[in-house]
Amino acid sequence: MALVESASGLIIFSEISEAFLQRTGRDIGRSMERCQGAPRGIVKMKNFSIRVELLGRTIAADYEHLHARMRAAGFGTVIVSSDGSKAHLPPAEYVHSTTEALATTKTVRNKASAAASTQLRAGLSHRVFVVQMADWASMNLQPA
């Protein structure tokens, strides 16, 4: 995974790419100098995998509304690999990436739970599972 200059000019990298830089001996400071006008600081991207399941007598529209609410809250259903390829996550799975220093599995869980429970049809409930990712692997995911 390479360093990426964000729209704000910050250089963002994950724990995986930090280890890569250390292993290959690349100088982070020099890499930052190549970004015109970039602030002198590095922001670590935190990546979370989230599963949200609706409980009760659900219909297809319940999940369509859930996906719309999750998207609006910043959760996606497409994951990007270190080589740049994209894939759709399995149903009820979401990914969330943030540079928020205070983001934890609990804060992401609360954000996902709030999105899932907003305008939830009467008689339904939900459950949420969140894990912070350092690396991932998949098989047979549908390309995005």
Image (cartoon, rainbow, N blue to C red):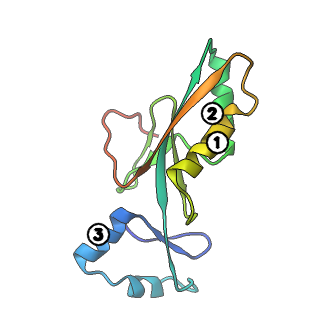
How far across and down, in percent of the image, does residue 103 sit?
56, 58
Q: Residues within 10 Å of mark 3 (few under 14, many from 20)?
A: some
What's the distance in space between the residues labelled 2 and 1, CA to CA?
Answer: 6 Å
For the image shown, how many numbered marks are present on the structure?
3
What's the distance in space between the residues labelled 2 and 3, CA to CA?
Answer: 34 Å
Q: Secondary structure at mark 3?
A: helix
Q: Is residue 56 above or below residue 65?
A: above
Callouts 1 and 3 close, C-beta under 8 Å? no
Q: Residue at x 45, y 31 (%)?
A: 90
Three-letter amino acid code of the residue under disc 1: Arg
Three-letter amino acid code of the residue under disc 2: His
Callouts 2 and 1 close, C-beta under 8 Å? yes
Q: Circle 1 is placed at which residue position?
A: 71
N-terminal of the two: label 1 or label 3? 3
Q: Circle 3 is placed at which residue position?
A: 20
What's the distance in space between the residues labelled 1 and 3, CA to CA?
Answer: 31 Å
Q: Is residue 70 above or below residue 106?
A: above
Could you tell me which quadrant the N terminus lies in? bottom left
Q: Given the current orientation, which residue lies at the most extreme front position? A: 106
Q: Can see residue 98?
A: yes
- Checking the image for residue 43, the label placed there is none
